[in-house]
Image (spheres, helix red, strand yellow):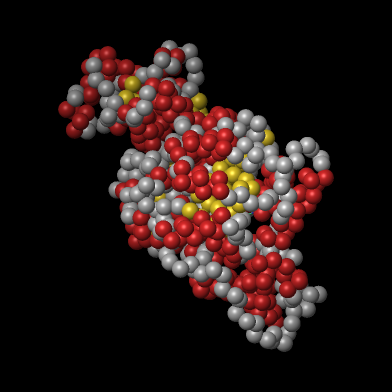
Amino acid sequence: MDVTGTVTGNGTNTADRSETEAQRTLHRVFGYDAFRGEQGAVIEHVVSGGDAVVLMPTGGGKSLCYQIPSLVRRGTGVVVSPLIALMQDQVDALRALGVRAGFMNSTQDFDERRSMEAQFLAGELDLLYLAPERLRLDSTLSLLARGEISVFAIDEAHCVAQWGHDFRPDYLALSVLGERWPDVPRIALTATATDATHQEITRRLGMPDAKHFVASFDRPNIQYRIVPKSDPKKQLLTFLKEEHEGDAGIVYCLSRASTEKIAEYLTRNGINAVPYHAGLDASTRATHQARFLREEGLVVVATIAFGMGIDKPDVRFVAHLDLPKSVEGYYQETGRAGRDGEPSTAWMAYGLQDVVQQRKLIQGGEGDEAHRRRAAAHLDSMLALCETVQCRRAQLLTYFGQEPTAANCGNCDTCLVPPETWDGTVVSQKLLSTVVRLKRERNQKFGAGQIIDILLGRKTAKVIQFDHDQLSVFGIGEELAEAEWRGVVRQLLAQGLLAVEGEYGTLVLTDDSATVLGREREVLLRKEPKKPTTRSSSSAGSKGAKGKAAVADLPASAVPVFEALRTWRGATAKEQGVPAYVIFHDATLREIATLHPSSLAELGSISGLGEKKLATYGEGVLEVLAETAPAAAAAPEAPAPTAPTPRAAAPAPAPARTKAPAAPQHSDPEFAWDEEPPEYE
Ligand SMILES: Nc1ncnc2c1ncn2[C@@H]1O[C@H](COP(=O)(O)OP(=O)(O)OP(=O)(O)O)[C@@H](O)[C@H]1O
Ligand SMILES: [Mg+2]
Ligand SMILES: [Zn+2]
């Protein structure tokens, strides 16, 4: 770890040597066989002193891109991250690998902070995590100036983008790093990939000379599905019961009240669920997050304030009950599913009310005209994704400026059950004429409900009150059912052929409406599926079995071994107060169960087992294997010991957590942008 990294030329000896060092660190510390995708190139570049901007999808492996340079180069790697509530977990996970990591944020008391400062100054830290609002303090900057820094990593770098979905003002101050430490390489990382965000990150962080690394944003194991919203609570429950019983997942709602109601509803219906939003007190939030990380199969019903950077590998589904405000937001949130590469679902229920609500929020929202235009453009892209009749994955990748690998991915709802389109020109004209007549003949504007009642010829109290049964358009739309009419309104709104206005979401014409009324264009509409597709209808497989994904590809004989290892992992995690996956991922347990190693040396060759974990847990694992071996040896050619092995000493406890995960404080900007939109009763 003595490579200074001042070399700038390419292909020099130093660069070659450091690459080897990086690879050795990957094997020895992290226990992984090979770099993923761009990781190797990024690390090589940063180790030799270059700046880098890294775009990689959620779960793509960005952390290694700064962790390994921090270990290879001299000094401490300083990581700027907005995820205060996760720092303890991140540091625990690193310490379990034998990495000397620490953090400084508002959750610590004076003594803890002092001790961290002392370790930093003594050169005893490989990695130091800091919140951006702490980094910008003069006291912090002068502390950093007194120590030795190997690399600055700016994680979740999209937070610097002012019009992005996660803007944090404190990120704007980070350009000072390049000015004060011109010789220390900087690496900015994000999973938000549009070109505009990309440019903004580079500009605002002052990194014009940085090399850019863009990984593929495809997440093939995530199945994307967007269903028409009718009774969202029930739809969600059915989705969970049919496809994800016992699985961990996140349900996103826009309003705080909804998260509580939905969590309560799920709990009443036998699904273990807790709410998470900015209005809950800090300790409840911390407890719910900790439970999500530590328990198996917990559902968190959250506002967008939850989930960023959480490295929980086995989140099996992400469900949206409200329309996200942008494709970037949708992609980031759905990306939290399936970080372990196992099949996962991104499911969303979306309806007319979402479009009306979001358009209203934009019109009535804060900010200038330019801001509103940008928000409207984001919404339009999101709506286009919802209404597309083409592959959703292809559309997502195209949105992020990437070439889809195939026109049809075979793993999204539109590929699995291609939606039919129909010529909706005539019905659109009927609907638009109703809006026109109300305006012209009565000087009135109404919302979708009343317009549809008029089209269906319903003599409701409100229709009678306004004499709407006297209109010539009364009852001209009986060929469609109410739900279908709502679909028409929704799609016209999405296509910009109709607009909503004002507090009550009244329907009004747009400039383009005239082209439909004047028969200058056809309107193609998507047929509303009678019954939403579910995974069980599109692929075989047992449903509802707890942990089914985890044992999916295991040979039958390895299943009991895997289960025994899981039980051991659960007990060990509990004892040490860390999430189970900090000890081993499911994938590692699966490999152990399948290969059934009989010695520490064999065990050490398994992915995810570095030096430290082998030393800490190796004996414990072999003990479990010895107990399960007689009944379940998966590979007969690798004889497992039949005689009981001597009881190994209990694994050395990893640094145990001394207190419950610290709660973020008031100054925590994590929740600044949590808003208050619609609720579900
Ligand atoms: N080369 C590798 N081989 C095997 N596993 C890897 C490798 N690189 C990363 N991983 C694993 O992939 C998972 C995701 O990595 P990481 O937390 O760095 O994702 P991320 O890109 O930071 O995502 P997010 O945007 O959600 O923060 C981690 O559990 C990590 O251990
Ligand atoms: Mg990350
Ligand atoms: Zn597809």
Would you say residue 197 is visible in this rendering? no
In the rendering, at what x and y percent does residue 273 appear?
Answer: 40, 59
Whether residue 645 can be seen here: yes
When asked about the image quadrant of residue 15, the answer is top right
Count of labels in the image: 0
Work out whether residue 412 or residue 581 is closer to the camera in this orientation and state it.
581
**Compared to 333, does 491 lie above or below?**
above
Q: Residue at x 61, y 49 (%)?
A: 148
The answer to whether residue 507 is left or right of residue 605 is left
Find residue 364 and report its image quarter.
Answer: top left
Residue 494 position by quadrant: top left
Is residue 277 shown above or below 187? below
Q: Position of residue 77 (x, y in %)?
A: 60, 50
Residues 29 and 522: in front is: 29
Q: Quadrant of the N terminus?
A: bottom right
Residue situated in front as seen by the camera: 232 or 393? 393
Instruction: Please tell me which residue lies in front, 557 or 308.
Output: 308
